[in-house]
Amino acid sequence: MRRPRIRFAFTLVELLVVIAIIGILVALLLPAVQAAREAGRRSSCQNNLKQLALAQHNRHDNRKYLPPGCTTDLGEWGASPGGPGGWGSSWMVFSLPYIEQTAMYNRWDFTVAGNSGYVNPNNRAMRDNIIFPAFRCPSTNLREFGEGVPAMIANYVGISGCVTIPATANTPLFNEARIDPSAGGGNSCCSGGGPASAGGCFFRGSKIKLADITDGTSNTMMIGEHGSKFTTTDFSKRDWSAGGLYGWCMGTNTNTPPNGGATGDNRQFNCTTIRYLINTTTGWTTAGGLSTQSGDCGAGVCYDVGNNIPLNSNHPGGCNVAMGDASVRFMSQTTTLDILGKLSTRDEGMVVSLD
């Protein structure tokens, strides 16, 4: 008589225990995987900033000064002589030959009065729907292109300096006197979206030499990040960055104060003046009767660009910053405004150690 075959199998309880153990292991492993991926993205972002900072040094070696942060196009800036015109070009346009984009730079038109820079048909045909990985942080959640304008939104911004940092109980007044007069001076705001400094490395019509950075290039911020969405008081998520609606190549409409000073359109694209802490990306109001889409231009943080959009990123705890010596640092979001103000100013004589 044959004996019945005995079958071995998991009971339901054993199966549930195994599934629970697997779930726990996955739960433990997933954060580590995500952290590793973010570490890789952060490293890639730092490499982008390193290459952009080195590009500024190479251009300085060639032209003897850093490019303007933003400018209306003049023959002095471009490849051939021409009159002032249009909204001009940003520091990233002048960086093109030094990030292996010489062909695009050589074809860029700086010369058409009233129709230069980002709005020039020749330039638009080249830049539309083109992604430059060197201008994008892998961790960003911002859209790739401007709204209604197919120009890439860059995640890196030239640092113009800072506004006056008020005194606190523990920090003395830091007074940056060289506020761009076209932005009204001091802390006063204007129709162009907040005060703009001329104390840093990149600003309207700037021609800064490395020798002008007397605080030391290793102590002065040159390029920072704009890579995260902003949240308004109605909890809407907005893509606000220094390129505004127009992308990486947008400059400014004049290199001199318009309309007698603070009453003109003083927006300075692809540059920012330090006024807020790093990663101050929540709680922005819609003051002044503006729509939620527009933001608070009086506070220098606008949908159609403001001069004081804070440095920000999706890297946990802070953002990457390229210094004047082309080194790259991760700047904590707990860094005080006093320190940020000093680091964003090239020659105030108050050196800050980050070690």
Image (cartoon, rainbow, N blue to C red):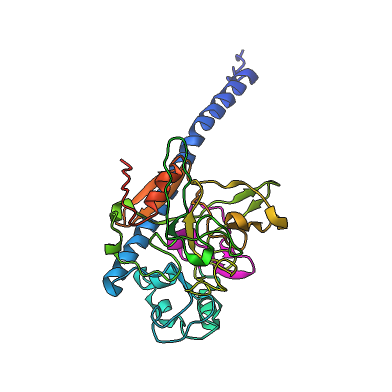
> x and y percent of residue 159 in the render?
43, 58
Quadrant assignment, res 217: bottom left
Residue 291 visible at all: no
Quadrant assignment, res 355: top left
In the displayed structure image, the side of residue 276 where residue 58 appears, left or right: left
Q: Nearer the viewer, residue 121 or 349?
A: 349
- Which residue is drawn at the image coordinates 31% and 57% (left, top)? 326
In the figure, 77 relative to 267: above or below? below
- Number of marks present in the image shown: 0
- Quadrant containing the N terminus is top right
Q: Is residue 250 magenta?
A: no
Residue 169 visible at all: yes
> x and y percent of residue 319 in the render?
45, 48
- Which residue is drawn at the image coordinates 40% and 78% (left, top)? 77
Q: Nearer the viewer, residue 36 or 268?
A: 268
> x and y percent of residue 47 in the render?
37, 55
Q: Which residues are magenta?
A: 131-157
In the displayed structure image, the side of residue 64 where residue 69 appears, left or right: right
In the displayed structure image, the side of residue 270 where residue 294 appears, left or right: right
In the figure, 147 relative to 331: above or below? below
In the displayed structure image, the side of residue 160 where residue 13 appears, left or right: right
